[in-house]
């Protein structure tokens, strides 16, 4: 199970910077909810997907008005 988590605590009347609302970490858990690993990336991303057959992680980065897909070989990040 792969998920993102911001860890941001909402404070009434406080508007966080946009950069605090975009994750740059993916947490991996087994089917019993036990943590397996945490992956941290240089570029915050809006969403991600995994191509298990092609062994590639895709992230969607959105800076200014230009969306960009960044790919990571799973063999590199799952070491």
Image (spheres, rainbow, N blue to C red):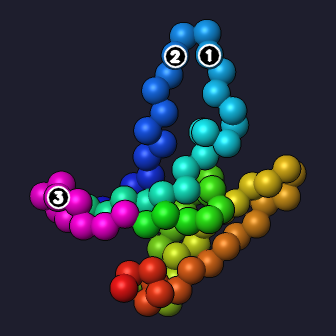
Residue at mark 2 to residue at mark 3: CA–CA distance: 29 Å
Relative vertical location of residue 53 with respect to residue 6 in this rendering, above or below: below
Mark 1 lies on a secondary structure that is: loop
| Rendering coords of residue 32 (x, y %) | 13, 58
Question: Looking at the image, do the residues carrying marks 1 and 2 touch, with CB atoms under 8 Å apart?
Answer: yes
Residue at 62% in and 16% down: 14
How crowded pointer 2 is (Cα within 10 Å; few <14, some 14-19, many 20+) is rated as few
Question: Looking at the image, do the residues carrying marks 3 and 1 touch, with CB atoms under 8 Å apart?
Answer: no
| Rendering coords of residue 1 (x, y %) | 30, 62
The answer to if 37 sits in the magenta stretch is yes
How crowded pointer 1 is (Cα within 10 Å; few <14, some 14-19, many 20+) is rated as few
| Rendering coords of residue 38 (x, y %) | 37, 63
Q: Quadrant of the C terminus?
A: bottom left
Q: Earlier in the sequence, mark 2 or mark 3?
A: 2
Left or right, 28 with reference to 56: left
Q: Which mark is residue 59?
A: none
Residue that protrudes farthest toward the top in the picture = 13
User: Does residue 2 appear in the picture of this structure?
Assistant: no
Magenta residue span: 30-38
User: Does residue 49 appear in the picture of this structure?
Assistant: yes
How crowded pointer 3 is (Cα within 10 Å; few <14, some 14-19, many 20+) is rated as few
Query: Can you identify the residue that label 2 sits on?
Result: 11
Residue at mark 1 to residue at mark 2: CA–CA distance: 5 Å
The answer to if 13 sits in the magenta stretch is no
Residue at mark 3 to residue at mark 1: CA–CA distance: 33 Å
Between circles 2 and 3, the one closer to the viewer is 2
Mark 2 lies on a secondary structure that is: loop
Relative vertical location of residue 40 with respect to residue 5 in this rendering, above or below: below
Q: Which mark is residue 14?
A: 1
């Amino acid at each position: 199970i792969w998920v993102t988590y911001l860890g941001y605590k909402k404070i009434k009347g406080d508007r966080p910077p946009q950069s605090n609302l975009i994750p740059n970490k993916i947490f991996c858990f087994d089917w019993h909810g036990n943590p397996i690993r945490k992956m941290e990336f240089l570029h915050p991303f809006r969403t991600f997907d995994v191509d298990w057959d092609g062994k590639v992680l895709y992230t969607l980065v959105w800076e200014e008005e230009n969306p960009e897909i960044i790919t990571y070989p799973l063999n590199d990040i799952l070491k």
